[in-house]
Image: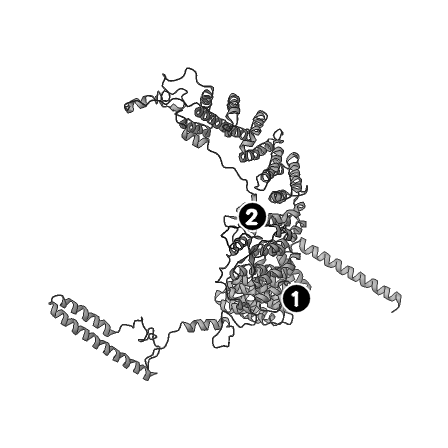
Amino acid sequence: MHPSAYAHWSLSTARDLTLEAARDASNARKSTTRILPSGQLKKLLDSRAERDVLEGLRRVVTMSYRQPPSQTLPFFTAVIKNIASPSLPVKKLVYIYLLQHAEHEPDTALLSINTIQKSLTDQNPQLRALALRVMSGIRVPVISQIVSLGIKRGVGDMSPYVRRAAALAIPKCYSLDPNTEPQLLEYLSTLLGDKQYFVTGAAVAAFLEFCPDRMDLIHPHYRSLVRKLVDMDEWGQLATLRLMMVYSRRCFPRRTRKVKKAVASMGANNKSTRTTTKGFYDSDSESEKSEDQEEMEEVVTLDPDLELFLKACQPLLQSRNTAVVIAVARTYLYLGTPEYISTAIGPLISLLRSAQDLQHIVLYNIVQVCLSHPGRFVKYYTHFLVRSTDAPQIWRLKLELLTLIFPYTPPRLQSLILAELSHFSHSGSLDPGLVKEAVRAIGRCSQGSATSPKTSARCLRLLLAHIGSADAHLVAESLEVIRHLIQRDPNNHRTTVVRLAKHLDAATSPQARASIIWLVGEFAGVDPENNIAADVLRILAKGFADEAEPAKLQIMLLAAKVYIHHLNANPPPEIAKPAGPQPPSALLEGFQDEGGFRDPHFEPQSSHQIPESQAPERPHPIAALYQYILLLTRYDTSYDLRDRARVYKALLASPSSTQLASLLLLAPKPVPQTPSPSEIRKGYVLGSASLVVGDEGGVGGLRGYEDLPSWVKEGREPNPALRDEDGTLNEYVAGGNGGRILTASEKLDVASSSRAYEPSSSPGKKLNGFGAGTSRGTVGEKKEKTLDDWLAEEEEEEGSTEEETDDEEEEEEEEEEESEYETDDEESEESDDEGEAGRLMKQT
């Protein structure tokens, strides 16, 4: 070809392609922006041009996703008649429409079954798979047998795409007609042993949905499934990992053995220089035995098949699917040993580079693993540092992870983590929620059992620095954490309580003031010589009316505690009781008032407490403060405050008896422990949606949540030979078939034959009628009553009534005669039965 002609041909071809692409793009824009009238849509669907039909189907399918089915049902007939089109795109769109509307028009949908069945024999495997998928997706119970036959044909298809579609159609067919279960089990067992990993993954997914408890179907295919795990698609891997998790817990017992502890720091020189003390009468064997017992520890022993599965999961840690990596981590956490868990932590951390929605889910799973193995996350601490771009749900989990690994980090890293938390707790311009969570994180870092006193003191200093802050919420949260720290060791924090009392005037938050007042009252009796509780009460009593309700409650509690300490230190003399009983009228006189009854506990000087002769001229200042606080609470508007005042007044009604009040108010309080926020989610399985949702999904998790089964007890596990792939041993083996695995139909035949009645041992007798299957030779079985039996029973009843009126001698004679009659009757019955059996033999 001449160069100029070639250039002209190239330009014309490019121009045609450009025009065609522009035309297609414009049609695509038109099809998605404007909805055509129904008449025009029917015209497109009835057109003979394939392009117009395809355009009409696209618009109808688009409408089905945007509008309710009632808007697209009028096109059902026009769409279904295009199901026989030879075009694959047209058939796909018709099948999509049919799946969405078959339940609304079941009678019309049945007209397309014959055409779909013909597609099962098409030369195109994709079309065969699509036809099987559509036929199983039509929710019409009448076609269940047709779907079962289609699955049977698909199981034996040469294409793996068709076999995969057959596997996915099994649960749908079972939901249409549960009576097809025996045939479907046979098909599923065949698909589980398929050589194509593409088919096996779908078969496992169908197994989990169809019959998840039939572990006997998995035994012969266990090792082949494990070997195909790496080559499966991502969703097949997820289904197989989930299945193997349950299978391993039910079929492999958790075995342990004792081994010597590996002491890395002990070398050969240390072993030679180590000395052991031994008694004079102790033998060498006993000393060696005791030494071995001290150095023994239990380690998990893995079953060879379980270890084969765990090793097959290791390549999946490099998967691009986040769900697969989490599923492998779940497998190692619940089935493996600590060594396997360590290999899964790195890939879990690498998932934090994903988008924020995936980070949120991954962090929940990382926290779940960290609750069990916090020390293994220490070297990844830099990934848990909060960034300025992190969302609130992400930095909350990161702060929790920092507090979980804090006790296991070296001092250098502990200093770095505290500096990080201190930075966010001082940042007033940031989110107030972040400031509050940072303060709580500091408190959780200081309360760990492995935290040194030096680190706890530093945490306390960081929190005390927030007392002078202008942020009331920060001060309140800091004081709440400080209160928990002081309760752990009150003797070493006396000066801290005094320092907090000095900042009482500067504190404006009601919660902050309530925390300080509670601390002053709680530790008022720790150091009686340097007690400042009475002075603090005197200052607070001046502004009691202006305090908030939480602060008023604590001031009243402080007054009661100070008064109890005063009474215990200066016990008043006991009051002598009157000699004789007082009449009821005399008792009521002191409690009556002009308008009715009054509460005597609110009287400043009640006559029933201390007689006037014994009352001091001037009360003690602490007693006066206590009475003054009670008088103020009497006229307060808060119901809770007035009720609490009545309780304290009743407890301290008798100053000479303070045992009950001391027991209730001065009892030592337990040290509060602030658990990690994710402790409430610890019972949920790793990788489940209930783990992310938490208690919001309900007490037992979301609907459909399944907990892990318990480990099978040793001795109750299935025979390991069942997992042999040669099929020499199986749970369902026919006795006369040479060890062949029975199919589902054969199993039903065996079960029905085992329930059949055994033939009678008497000659000439066959099974006939309802009771003909019973034999007289069997022990413990009763024969049917005949007419002679009923007559014999009536004669016995008549004979018994006559015997009551006769003498004892006649009774014995009649009993002998009756016994003879009974034997004669039985012989006659047997002869009658044999004669009847002979007549039946002759008739047959």
**Towards the viewer: 473 or 423:** 423
- Element at label 2: helix
**Towards the viewer: 593 or 222:** 222
Which residue in the structure is indicated by mark 1?
A: 88
- Percent from the top left, x then y, of residue 407? 60, 43
Considering the image in quadrants, where does the N terminus appear?
A: bottom right
Q: Please name the amino acid that badge 2 sits on.
A: Val
Disc 1: CA contacts within 10 A as few (<14), some (14-19) or many (>=20): few
Location of residue 414 (image quadrant): top right
- The relative height of residue 562 versus residue 330 in the rendered view (above or below) is above
Marks 1 and 2 in Cβ contact (< 8 Å):
no
**Towards the viewer: 284 or 205:** 284
Outermost residue toward the bottom?
842
Q: Can residue 147 be spotted in the picture?
A: no
Outermost residue toward the front?
280
- Percent from the top left, x then y, of residue 749? 45, 73
Q: Can residue 677 be spotted in the picture?
A: yes
Which residue in the structure is indicated by mark 2?
A: 693
- Element at label 1: helix
Q: Please name the amino acid that badge 1 sits on.
A: Leu
Find the distance from the CA under tag 1 to the CA under tag 2: 43 Å
Considering the image in quadrants, where does the C terminus appear?
A: bottom left
Give the label, 1 or 2, closer to the camera: 2
The residue depicted at 56 percent of the width and 32 percent of the height is: 492
Q: Earlier in the sequence, mark 1 or mark 2?
A: 1
Q: How is the image coloured?
A: one colour
- The relative height of residue 221 versus residue 694 in the rendered view (above or below) is below
Location of residue 124 (image quadrant): bottom right
- Percent from the top left, x then y, of residue 5? 87, 66
